[in-house]
Amino acid sequence: MAELRATVKQVLSQLAESREARYYLTQFSSTDRMHFAVVKVGGGVLDQQLDALAAALAFLRNLGLMPIILHGAGPQLDAALEEAGIETVKRDGLRVTSPEAMGVIRPVTYRANRQLVTALERQGVRAQGIQHGVFECDYLDRDRLGLVGDIRRIDLEAIREAVDRGVLPVVASLGESATGQVMNINADFAARELIWAVEPHKIIFLTPTGGLLDESGRVISAISLRTDFDYLVSQPWVHSGMQLKLQQVAQILEKLPDTASVSITSVENLARELFTHRGAGTLIRQGEQILELDEFSESDAARTATLLEQSFGRKLNPGYFDNLPISKVLVSESFGAMAIVLEGVDGIPYLDKFAVTPEAQGAGLGAAVWQALIQRCPELYWRSRVDNPVSPWYFEQADASFTRDGWVAFSRGVRDFARLQRCAEDSLAREPSWQEKSDDD
Ligand code: ARG
């Protein structure tokens, strides 16, 4: 116990924001042990990063968390089959599995499984390889695919027993038919079925790239399926592999509660992904509906005040909500991200407040509200202090800006010069809505 506490302390001190880390540790420990996470490890990661992988998983175990690990062995199988002179044939992306191929696949998968178990034990963590008895299969298409299994039933007993004993379960993607014929299962299918059976809070895909990449090769931090899915799959730069991944994830999350989330990350970034708001990887959630309010009911006003005061770190003027000339209010369901738009000059909407909590930012809700905002307001203007940490981001969003006396007036979509000028003047002349230190917004 003392040792555990030492680990926790060490970890928390390593993470810059230990309050954040504690927040997530509490969240992840609050469900019963079985439901923390399913971690899917690709065969490539297992092959190339075995010790780092084991260390990252051991770290979670030492925090008292019990991830359920599922692995594939794709690259190992490719190499071993080639060595055995058996040609790899794929149909519909699935490995056609002849009896001879199975003769190679089975021992190679066992070996990959044992390697991870051994590596975990080297880290001082007890682990148990589970190579049978989880996935009961039928032939997916015996004539075309051979011994490829279609999962019919999942038996969680072996996994549950391991978790109860505090031993990390390491599950291979092999199954059996009802009569005991061993079958090869695509690791993504195995992961999906296992996730549905376990219903974990977190689903983690460990990959070498550590996330889904955008147009310019940067990791996309967060995707909220409700608001981003259609847009993303219609983008020309979203190649077929990424489309498939998005569809898979959407399908997985569809059957889980909204609180579940998928993180695609790398071994190196796993701890940062899990224990910070910002994360390091791609977080995918069902996301929240973005609601449009016409007015502030008493309870909406109270929640809004809390959000604004927390994110800006100051008190609103007591009369802020009285006679507010609302043009549009957009807010995520949880009130974690919000835009308040007022009537401005020349009928152009003025963005009076844009506020996002750190958690909502990490979940991609700030971006979702912003997206909804610019869709609804093709013309928009707003202001911020030059030294506001969000200003650089505002510069990216705006297509015109004007700086004076420590303030920046921004706009987007306003074309006419005279109107542009009236917007800038109006935003810089507006009264602050905050008490004390009345020079900030
Ligand atoms: N730590 C939180 C989680 O794992 C948030 C992660 C945010 N990650 C991201 N890539 N935006 O649920």
Image (cartoon, rainbow, N blue to C red):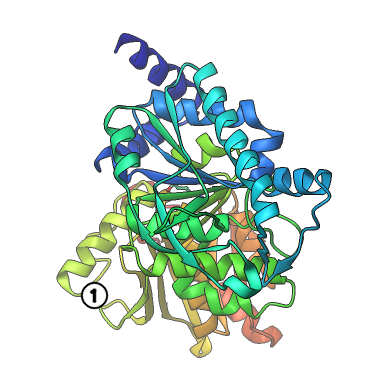
Residue sitting nearer the eye, 45 or 72: 72
The tally of labels here is 1
Going by the numbered disc 1, the residue's amino acid type is: Phe
Q: Residue drawn at (39%, 59%), measured in percent from left and top?
A: 178
Quadrant of the snapshot with the N terminus: top left
- The 10 Å Cα crowd at callout 1, few under 14, some 14 to 19, many 20 or more, is some
Q: Position of residue 168 (x, y in %)?
A: 41, 31
Residue sitting nearer the eye, 13 or 210: 210
Q: Can residue 278 be seen by looking at this rendering?
A: no
* Circle 1: element type: loop
Relative to 397, 295 lies left or right: left
The outermost residue toward the left is 298
Residue sitting nearer the eye, 338 or 114: 114
The outermost residue toward the top is 2
Compared to 90, does 132 lie above or below?
above
Give the residue pinned by disc 1.
296
Compared to 411, does 375 lie above or below?
below
Compared to 236, does 249 lie above or below?
above
Q: Position of residue 63 (x, y in %)?
A: 37, 26
| Image-quadrant location for residue 51 | top right
Q: Can residue 65 be seen by looking at this rendering?
A: yes
Q: Position of residue 354 (x, y in %)?
A: 44, 64
Q: Is mark 1 within 8 Å of ligand 1?
A: no
| Image-quadrant location for residue 32 | top left
Quadrant of the snapshot with the C terminus: bottom left
Q: Residue drawn at (62%, 39%), measured in percent from left and top?
A: 107
Q: Residue drawn at (44%, 27%), measured in percent from left and top?
A: 127
Residue sitting nearer the eye, 85 or 261: 85
Relative to 394, 343 lies left or right: left
